[in-house]
Amino acid sequence: MKLPHERFDYSALPQREALKLPNGARMAVYVMVNIEEWDIQRPIAREYVPSPAGVTTVPNIPNWAWHEYGMRVGIWRIIDALEKRKIKASASINARVCEGAGEPVARAIRDLGWDFMGHGYAQAAMHVVEDQREVIQKSFDVLKAYTGKAPKGWLGPGLHETLDTLDYLSETGFQYVCDWPMDEHPFEMQTASGSITAMPYSFELSDLPMMVVHAYDSDTWLKRTIDQFDRLYEEGAVSPRIMSMGVHPYIMGVPHRIKYFEAAFDHMLKQKDVWFASADEIYDWYKGESD
């Protein structure tokens, strides 16, 4: 077990050498779509409709169905929005989706050429699984068998890790993680099996905290996304930056929000020198630059 600053050094962004993104881009943008399959026989961690009197209910029908809506309806709106704009996403996916009722969703995004990132086997934080090393290995093996290539990236369910998770991820073969939202550049963290890369990620642009936890109006997500993009684009003229957007089909894929998702990309696509890439592509570029 290692504490964070035993794994990486402090680094002040203004004191670093500026990144050189492909084709002179001022910034890179990647979108991560979280594909999740929840177990109706277990408590649902994320409730939009609170259980009566705060009692934990199993089965939790309305909140399970809320997530299932994303698999049946919402994901297809998100796919359509991205395809119309010729943008490929990265799918942070529970590996069990590839084996169960949600497999048609996994098949569709595989056919589109999206990256598959580990997101646990089933939707559960690493703190509560019986054997997280086994869960990480199973997730890796299922995604590799399903897609035909080893997954590179990992986003923990809820972004949560224990202090040992990085060691297990690295020894399994994962090469980068998105659970450490503390920079706008990639950086290296040390594990018992060598280094693993932390990719820039912003949970302040994630639809789950904004729309569900903090209950902002839907247009707040659009305004915040545009404000973040515009500032990073401005600063990117001096030191290029990387911006992430994390969304969930059951949140951003609903009829009253999808137009804000589309509008964000329409705004960004108007600017020159922006590299719209997958997380794997950004990782590959970074490793090529740093080797």
Image (spheres, rainbow, N blue to C red):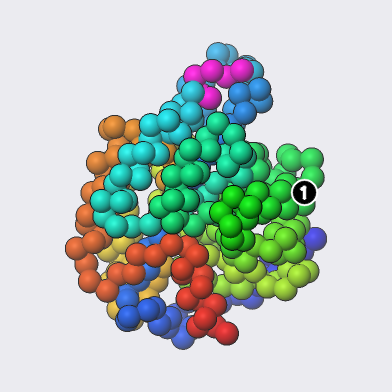
| Residue sitting at x 27%, y 74% | 273
Q: Is residue 34 left or right of residue 73?
A: right
Quarter of the image for the C terminus: give it.
bottom right
Quarter of the image for the N terminus: give it.
bottom right
* Mark 1 closeness class: few <14, some 14–19, many ≥20 residues within 10 Å: some
Which residue lies most toward the top here? 52
Is residue 61 inside the magenta stretch? Answer: yes
Q: Is residue 86 left or right of residue 163?
A: left
* Whole-percent x, y for residue 84 in the image: 25, 51
| Residue sitting at x 39%, y 71% | 241
Q: Is residue 72 visible?
A: yes
Q: Nearer the viewer, residue 284 or 9?
A: 284
| Residue sitting at x 23%, y 61% | 269
Give the number of callouts: 1
Q: Residue 188 occupies which quadrant of the picture?
A: bottom right
Q: Which residues are magenta?
A: 59-64
Q: Is residue 220 visible?
A: no
Q: Nearer the viewer, residue 210 or 268?
A: 268
Is residue 94 inside the magenta stretch? Answer: no
Q: Is residue 162 above or below residue 59?
A: below
Q: Is residue 250 above or below residue 8?
A: above
| Residue sitting at x 42%, y 30% | 72
Q: What secondary structure do most residues of the magenta stretch adopt?
A: helix
Which residue lies most toward the left here? 270
User: Is label 1 in a helix, a strand or a loop?
Assistant: helix
* Whole-percent x, y for residue 186 in the image: 52, 71
* Whole-percent x, y for residue 167 in the image: 74, 62
* Whole-percent x, y for residue 80 in the image: 30, 44
- What residue does disc 1 label? 134
Which amino acid, by three-letter code, is at mark 1? Answer: Glu
Q: Nearer the viewer, residue 75 or 199?
A: 75
